[in-house]
Amino acid sequence: MYLVIGATAHFGRQAVEELAAAGVPVRALTRTPEKAAFPAGVDVVQGDLTRPETLPAVMANVEAAFLVLQYGMDVAPLLSAARAAGVRRLVFLSSGAVVPDADQQPDVIARYHRDVERAIEASGVEWTFLRLLFPAINSLTFAMQLGGGDVIRAPYTEAAFSAVHERDVAEVAARILTGGGHSGQVYDLTGPGSLT
Ligand SMILES: NC(=O)c1ccc[n+]([C@@H]2O[C@H](COP(=O)([O-])OP(=O)(O)OC[C@H]3O[C@@H](n4cnc5c(N)ncnc54)[C@H](OP(=O)(O)O)[C@@H]3O)[C@@H](O)[C@H]2O)c1
């Protein structure tokens, strides 16, 4: 069984669909299954990361889990439930803002993700980190401006970024979840080209 956490939002939902299309057993965690609307065959399980008593049922028979965590979520209950259930691999969607080996991270987003990475490293479960800086969906923040014309006003206009489609993030996660073989690896996810 492959578990997706954060299954009803951007990255997790696409990972669930990817795994379901591949024909492997997939479980989606949500606090509100009645609203989840997943493809047939997906094992939709009700649970809450802030309520540890709900997590043993979520983790039962799970081989590998994809962790997409809402910013600030405490990862400790999830990790102890995963360890207790014998989960073998964790794939964590981390942030490209993390500065490797820095004593101090540059901002709160980087610090949160590095703290989660450290907790996962210490958990004893095999892990892979996907560090993503700019998902393509973030470009939708420009949509309102484009609705009013063809000019985008933004700071740092010369700054370049390499956008990655959420579906590609999901594909990478699904491949590592099901194939294994990427234990202890950190991957910086980048798109096909650098854009200003
Ligand atoms: N956007 C970026 O620029 C960017 C870049 C790099 C990495 N990321 C990573 O992506 C994350 C955001 O992902 P996202 O936008 O797909 O999700 P999101 O909107 O941040 O989080 C919503 C998801 O979290 C679940 N959730 C929230 N509280 C929960 C709880 N107490 N127990 C169980 N599940 C809970 C929700 O499930 P239900 O409501 O169904 O229960 C929903 O699936 C960031 O925090 C970061 O780690 C984002």
Image: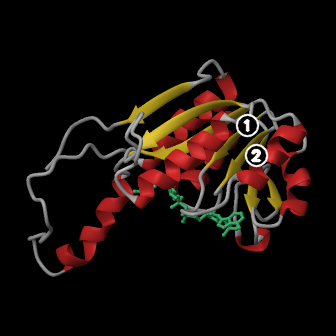
Identify which amino acid the numbered label 1 is placed on: Ser
Q: Give the side of residue 30 with respect to residue 144, left or right.
A: right
Q: Using the image as rendered, state which of residue 129 and residue 179 is in the foreground.
A: 129
Disc 2 element: helix
The amino acid sitting under disc 2 is Leu
Question: Regarding ligand 1, which quadrant of the image does it lie in?
Answer: bottom right
Residue 34 appears in view:
yes
The residue at 73%/52% (across/down) is 76
Give x and y (percent) for residue 22.
66, 34
Q: Position of residue 82 (x, y in %)?
A: 81, 42
Cα separation, mark 2 vs mark 1, equals: 7 Å
Please tell me whether residue 12 is drawn above or below residue 119 in the rendered image: below
Does the beta carbon of the residue at mark 1 sit less than 8 Å from ligand 1? no
Judging from the image, the colouring scheme is secondary structure
Q: Is residue 151 left or right of residue 166?
A: left
Q: Which of the labelled discs sits on residue 132, or is there none?
A: none
Residue 128 locus on image (x, y percent): 58, 31
Q: Which residue is rendered at x = 49% and y = 37% of the image?
A: 130
Quadrant of the image occupied by residue 173 = top right
Q: Compared to 95, does 7 lie above or below?
A: below
Tell me whether circle 2 and circle 1 mark residues in contact (CB < 8 Å). yes
- Report the residue at 12% width, 60% height from top: 156
**Of 161 and 119, the residue lying toward us:** 119
Asked where in the image residue 118 lies, by quadrant, the reply is top right
| 50 left or right of 67 in image | right
Instruction: Give the residue at mark 1.
Output: 123
Assess disc 2: are there few (<14), some (14-19) or many (≥20) residues with their C-alpha within 10 Å of its C-alpha. many
User: What residue is disc 2 on?
Assistant: 79
Q: Which mark is first along the chain, 1 or 2? A: 2
